[in-house]
């Protein structure tokens, strides 16, 4: 059997060994508290589920959907962006529903990346940015996100020799895995940088509605001129706890949207119409669910950060997302600490190296586990006797 050489460019999945060890421990009857997965534990709100149940019985929703999505969903997305961010979008040309934002992130690489193309990728960052680049034949150039720079990339440090080959830049705020936010002024600078170097920007923004302390994150499209050089990916997964329903959207520059639609129309058959109408219900319905969910997550964040600081793991208090990004103590690697927490106190976390070289001294905790399990995890962390070597 002869496989495509592009598969050889993809790095091995770092978490296989850890996942295998978790399975081994559970097979022995050992209870593992997992902070490793960023999947909301709270259910999709009932009105959204009720709309899905109703639409599932409508015969016309049983047929192939159109790739571009229902006009009703396009309009609901545009209206939500106007209400939430004050951003005006043309529903027909500047909005495209997605089968979850991940597929759009993967597919848009095929619109801009060729052999030899460079893509600017945040490090640490969501691995799909790099994987999609490599599958399309391009080369990721990693932009370090450093704690001392508030986890914002330093555009001035990128060599001109790299910029001359660059067509696309990925940004992601609120940021996975660091939990850092970005001010609108940074987005405006990114727009100027992109214009100056002929680069398009893809901003991945699934966590804008997961925020704390009343600090509502901006949209990249609020920056002056952003729509001329960028699109923004968004998702209903985090906002309305709809990860399993697979629906998201991309909005912004109409030429970029048209290019992505060309790829999608040849590779997928659209989103089931009942799920599209479920999304309309989410976007047009009561938004109090956002504040309710964030209040729960903020309490969890505060509990976890407190115990991490007490045991010697420096954790920056996140502005948003489901994640707490903690620096490992002196003498540990992130993989060492991940294994020690699993073996000694039966807690699963994610090693930061899985998100890039700049994450090598960090581990990521997710707070998307039920309160009783989080409390048990906090209790176990408090009893950990590591922290120095």
Image (spheres, helix red, strand yellow):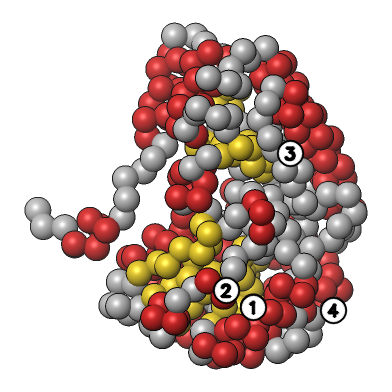
Q: How far apart are marks 1 and 3 (CA)?
A: 35 Å
Residue on which disc 1 sits: 190
Residue depicted at 42% across the width and 37% down the height: 15
Which one is earlier in the sequence, the residue at label 2 or at label 3? 3
Q: Distance between the residues labelled 2 and 3?
A: 38 Å
Front-lying residue, 291 or 222:
222
Q: Please say if the residues under marks 1 and 3 sit with CB atoms less than 8 Å apart.
A: no
Which one is earlier in the sequence, the residue at label 1 or at label 4? 4
Q: Quadrant of residue 267?
A: bottom left
Q: Residue 344: image x %, image y %?
A: 53, 13
Q: In this view, does 228 lie above or below 294?
A: below
Q: Distance between the residues labelled 1 and 4?
A: 20 Å
Q: How far apart are marks 4 and 2 (CA)?
A: 27 Å
Q: Please say if the residues under marks 2 and 3 sit with CB atoms less than 8 Å apart.
A: no
Q: Can residue 376 be seen in this view?
A: no
Binning the other alpha carbons within 10 Å of mark 3 as few (below 14), some (14 to 19) or many (20 upward) gives some
Please give left or right for residue 132 compared with residue 90 in the image. Answer: left
Residue on which disc 2 sits: 155
Residue on which disc 3 sits: 42
Q: Residue 53: image x %, image y %?
A: 70, 52
Which one is earlier in the sequence, the residue at label 4 or at label 2? 4
Q: Please say if the residues under marks 1 and 2 sit with CB atoms less than 8 Å apart.
A: yes
Q: In this view, does 386 lie above or below 237?
A: above
Give the number of the mark in front: 1 or 4: 1
Residue on which disc 4 sits: 86
Q: In which quarter of the image is residue 329?
A: top right
Q: Judging from the image, what secondary structure is the residue with disc 1 in?
A: helix
Q: Residue 142: image x %, image y %?
A: 46, 63
Please give left or right for residue 20 compared with residue 295 in the image. Answer: left
Residue depicted at 22% across the width and 56% down the height: 8
Which one is earlier in the sequence, the residue at label 3 or at label 4? 3
């Amino acid at each position: 059997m002869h496989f495509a050489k592009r598969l050889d460019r993809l790095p091995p999945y770092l978490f296989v060994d850890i996942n295998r060890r978790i399975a081994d421990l559970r097979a022995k009857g050992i209870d593992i508290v997992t902070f490793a997965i960023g999947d909301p534990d709270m259910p999709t709100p009932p009105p959204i589920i009720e709309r899905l149940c109703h639409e599932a019985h409508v015969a016309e929703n049983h047929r192939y959907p159109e790739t571009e999505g229902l006009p009703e969903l396009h309009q609901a997305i545009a209206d939500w962006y106007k209400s939430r961010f004050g951003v005006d979008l043309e529903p027909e040309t500047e909005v495209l529903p997605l089968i979850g934002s991940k597929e759009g992130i993967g597919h848009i690489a095929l619109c801009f990346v060729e052999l030899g193309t460079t893509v600017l990728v945040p490090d640490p960052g969501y691995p799909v940015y790099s994987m999609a680049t490599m599958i399309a034949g391009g080369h990721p150039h990693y932009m370090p996100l450093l704690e001392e720079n508030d986890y914002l990339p330093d555009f001035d440090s990128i060599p001109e020799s790299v910029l001359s080959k660059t067509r696309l830049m990925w940004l992601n705020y609120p940021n996975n895995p660091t939990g850092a936010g970005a001010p609108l002024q940074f987005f405006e600078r990114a727009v100027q940088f992109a214009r100056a170097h002929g680069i398009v920007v893809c901003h991945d923004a699934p966590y804008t509605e997961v925020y704390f302390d009343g600090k509502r994150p901006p949209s990249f499209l609020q920056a002056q001129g952003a729509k001329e050089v960028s699109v923004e990916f968004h998702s209903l997964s985090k906002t309305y706890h709809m990860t399993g329903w697979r629906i998201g959207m991309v909005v912004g520059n109409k030429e970029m949207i048209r290019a992505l639609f060309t790829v999608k129309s040849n590779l997928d058959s659209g989103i089931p119409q009942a799920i599209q109408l479920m999304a309309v219900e989410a976007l047009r319905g009561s938004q109090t669910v956002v504040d309710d969910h964030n209040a729960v997550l903020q309490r969890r964040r505060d509990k976890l950060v407190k115990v991490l600081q007490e045991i010697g793991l420096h954790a920056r208090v996140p502005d948003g997302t489901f994640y707490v990004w903690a620096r490992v103590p002196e003498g540990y690697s992130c993989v060492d600490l991940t294994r020690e927490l699993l073996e000694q106190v039966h807690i699963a976390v994610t090693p930061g190296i899985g998100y890039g070289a700049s994450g090598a001294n960090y581990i990521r905790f997710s707070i998307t586990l039920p309160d009783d399990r989080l409390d048990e995890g906090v209790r176990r962390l408090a009893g950990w006797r590591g922290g120095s070597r």
